[in-house]
């Protein structure tokens, strides 16, 4: 298998609407996240952070540019891949502000659902899920329903779900917003560990002052364009 | 793959079961309505079977004796007996009236029969057939009367000597069999004052001044030489149509075969009732569909966010549509089971016969499943429109 390029975005534009009401949300985005790296994406409200994640997540179509995820060029002035659902399922892990676990599945099956959707057997899928839950230190809650977990535990389950298909890419949108500083830092620590372990490229969109100092690299997004900066890269204890 | 539908149902089972039970009671009502109709048809067939007749001879141009009043002279059975192919023939009268026993009275169909002839109940639950020509009665158990009790029909008392089961009129009223003579009299009976008045009026008529004429006229006035029908049994090897033909032609009477009579009872007598019931079934089907559609739609709308997440993480539309449809069908199955059980439990409590046919239950089940599938389409449409981008948010 060809080596993963992580996330590579070149000259990406996104325009919402047409004519007078058109909004150029993204004008010239260039980003590169290597496998195993966690980068921050910050910017003022309305600067296009969510738009960028949606384009990368293949749920809205960019207007122009080129995107590479892992070892696949997925967009080159048009989708290069037909089945975007399968693309998302196999290549992208999502972590949101709220964990959005499926309330009627227990913790294990919330995680195991993804490999099941990808066609793995129930037993194999659950085995993978439990292994990840152990790594994330929530295995003792494996049989609980999501509503019985604390906010931090839920977020860790959500991270397990994002990782379980071993996607080359994880997209996280404000994953620490509802958490206190200790839990927020622990989520970032876990993302870093997992990124290293599975060679995943991770983008974390955030406003969260608590975690911004932990990134080694940060992309600022302003006026629809991205500017790279070195972060403080604080040690995570 | 795990069943998302089943997991969701288990998670919200309270809501689900409540809705299912509500729907089930509605389905129970629907099945019972169908049972009421089947009961009516069955009552009609039982009425025909129990009469023991192959043919009914009634007044010309009437649909008697069950669907329209019919009156024929009580001596024509003799000429009918002479028709080739006729085995047995007997007069019969039918009159629906209140029958009194002690303090309470029951609406019943009083049948006047000749012992040992067509029209007599074919088998008894208890007791014996009528043997005397006066003041004995065989009653259907549904009247609530007991062996040995005295019942009152018009001005005479009758002793209950036998009990039958499921001997009912086409209207579902239980039958009371009494000797034909008594029944003819009951049909015609005037109160004593009326008889005396009538006699005085006749005596005062100069046309009847001859004493013998007067006696004959008064006699004819106080007796009733009419019956409602003649029940005919045909000899083996003869066809009903063949035997009917000469009676119809020469005696100026109407003859119905068993098939024709069934057609009259089922198609004409209970036609309006069956339309009424069909109307009910249509409304109940629409209401059930609306309930399923509403509840499935509400349940689905409550899961929009989860559906967006499921789509984002790569769940196929087919899987999501399947989840919703399975839940709708699940609701229908719970409803059907509850409906079938409740209909079975309450059917015997109905005053008239309710016949729950397995075929109707099967048809009902299929209809419910189809209704549930259709009702889920609305929710499925809404779910498929959900944008996975919603899961990411602003
Ligand atoms: N569906 C849409 N149609 C039209 N314009 C849109 C749409 N979605 C976003 N926009 C516009 O695109 C721009 C970028 O929006 P986006 O949601 O990406 O911002 P954001 O950086 O995520 O902001 P926030 O930090 O507030 O979440 C905004 O001006 C917004 O109004
Ligand atoms: Mg946003």
Image (cartoon, coloured by chain):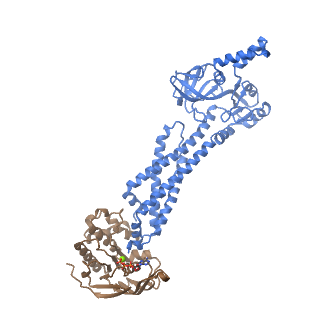
Which residue is at a point 36% across and 83% down the rendered structure image?
A: A7
Quadrant position of the N terminus of chain B in the picture: bottom left
Horizontal arrangement in the rendering, residue A144 relative to residue A80 (left or right): left
Q: Residue A70: which quarter of the image?
A: bottom left
Quarter of the rendered structure image containing ligand 1: bottom left
Residue B225, horizontal then vertical, whole percent: 71, 23
Residue B79, horizontal then vertical, whole percent: 76, 26
| Residue nearest the observer in this picture, B154 or A154 | B154
Q: In blue, which chain?
A: B
Numbered label tally:
0
Farthest top residue?
Answer: B211
Residue B257, horizontal then vertical, whole percent: 70, 36
Horizontal arrangement in the rendering, residue B35 relative to residue A23 (left or right): right
Farthest front residue?
Answer: A20
Q: In brown, which chain?
A: A
| Residue nearest the observer in this picture, B364 or B173 | B173
> Is B53 drawn above or below residue A1 in the view shown?
above
The answer to whether residue A144 is seen in the rendering is no
Residue B378, horizontal then vertical, whole percent: 50, 62
> Is B379 drawn above or below residue A77 in the view shown?
above
Q: Residue B218: which quarter of the image?
A: top right
> Is B244 drawn above or below residue B357 in the view shown?
above
Which residue is at a point 65% across and 23% down the rendered structure image?
A: B180
| Residue nearest the observer in this picture, A67 or A178 | A178
Q: Residue A102: which quarter of the image?
A: bottom left
The answer to whether residue B302 is seen in the rendering is yes
> Is B46 drawn above or below residue B178 in the view shown?
below
Quadrant position of the C terminus of chain B in the picture: bottom left
């Amino acid at each position: 298998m060809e080596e993963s390029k992580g996330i590579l975005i070149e000259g990406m534009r996104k325009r919402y609407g047409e004519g007078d009401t058109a909004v150029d949300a993204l004008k010239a985005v260039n980003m590169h996240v290597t496998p195993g790296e966690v980068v921050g994406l910050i910017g003022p409200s309305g600067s296009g952070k969510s738009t960028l994640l949606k384009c990368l997540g293949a749920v809205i179509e960019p207007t122009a540019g080129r995107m590479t995820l892992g070892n696949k060029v997925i967009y080159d002035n048009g989708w290069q891949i037909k089945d975007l659902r399968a693309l998302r399922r196999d290549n992208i892990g999502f972590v949101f502000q709220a964990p959005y676990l499926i309330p009627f599945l227990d913790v294990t099956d919330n995680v195991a659902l993804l490999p099941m959707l990808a066609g793995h057997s129930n037993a194999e899928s659950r085995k993978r899920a439990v292994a990840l839950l152990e790594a994330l230190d929530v295995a003792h809650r494996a049989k609980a329903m999501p509503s019985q977990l604390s906010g931090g535990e839920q977020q860790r389950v959500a991270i397990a779900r994002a990782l379980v298909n071993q996607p080359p890419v994880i997209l996280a949108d404000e994953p620490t917003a509802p958490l206190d500083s200790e839990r927020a830092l622990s989520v970032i620590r876990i993302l870093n560990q997992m990124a290293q372990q599975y060679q995943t490229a991770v983008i974390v969109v955030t406003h969260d002052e608590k975690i911004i100092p932990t990134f080694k690299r940060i992309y600022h997004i302003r006026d629809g364009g991205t500017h790279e900066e070195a972060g403080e890269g604080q040690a995570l204890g | 793959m795990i069943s998302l539908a089943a997991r969701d149902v288990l998670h919200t089972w309270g809501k689900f079961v409540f809705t299912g039970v509500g729907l089930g009671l509605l389905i129970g009502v629907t099945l019972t309505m169908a049972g009421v109709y089947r009961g009516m048809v069955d009552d009609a067939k039982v009425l025909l079977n129990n009469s023991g007749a192959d043919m009914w001879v009634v007044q010309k141009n009437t649909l008697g004796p069950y669907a329209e009043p019919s009156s024929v002279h009580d001596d024509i059975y003799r000429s009918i007996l002479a028709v080739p192919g006729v085995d047995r023939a007997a007069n019969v009268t039918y009159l629906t009236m209140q029958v009194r026993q002690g303090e309470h009275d029951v609406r019943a169909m009083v049948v006047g029969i000749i012992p040992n002839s067509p029209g007599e109940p074919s088998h008894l639950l208890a007791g014996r057939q009528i043997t005397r020509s006066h003041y004995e009665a065989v009653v259907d158990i549904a009247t609530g009367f007991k062996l040995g009790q005295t019942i009152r029909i018009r001005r005479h008392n009758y002793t209950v000597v036998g009990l039958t089961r499921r001997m009912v009129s086409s209207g579902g009223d239980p039958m009371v069999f009494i000797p034909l003579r008594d029944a003819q009299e009951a049909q015609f009976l005037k109160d004593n004052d009326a008889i005396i008045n009538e006699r005085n009026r006749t005596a005062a008529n100069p046309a009847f001044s001859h004493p013998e004429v007067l006696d004959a006229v008064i006699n004819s006035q106080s007796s009733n030489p009419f019956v409602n029908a003649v029940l005919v049994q045909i000899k083996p090897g003869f066809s009903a149509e063949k035997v009917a033909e000469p009676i119809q032609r020469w005696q100026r009477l109407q003859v119905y075969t068993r098939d024709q009579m069934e057609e009259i009872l089922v198609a004409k007598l209970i036609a309006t009732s069956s339309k009424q019931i069909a109307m009910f079934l249509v409304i109940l089907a629409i209401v059930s569909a609306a309930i399923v559609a509403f509840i499935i739609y509400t349940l689905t709308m409550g899961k929009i966010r989860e559906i967006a997440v499921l789509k984002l993480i790569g769940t196929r539309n087919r899987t999501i549509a399947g989840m919703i449809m399975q839940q709708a069908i699940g609701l229908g199955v719970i409803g059907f089971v509850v409906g079938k059980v409740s209909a079975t439990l309450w059917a015997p409590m109905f005053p008239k016969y309710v016949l729950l046919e397995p075929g109707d239950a099967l048809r009902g089940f299929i209809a419910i499943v189809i209704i549930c599938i259709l009702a889920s389409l609305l929710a499925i449409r809404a779910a498929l429109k959900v944008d996975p981008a919603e899961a990411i948010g602003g």
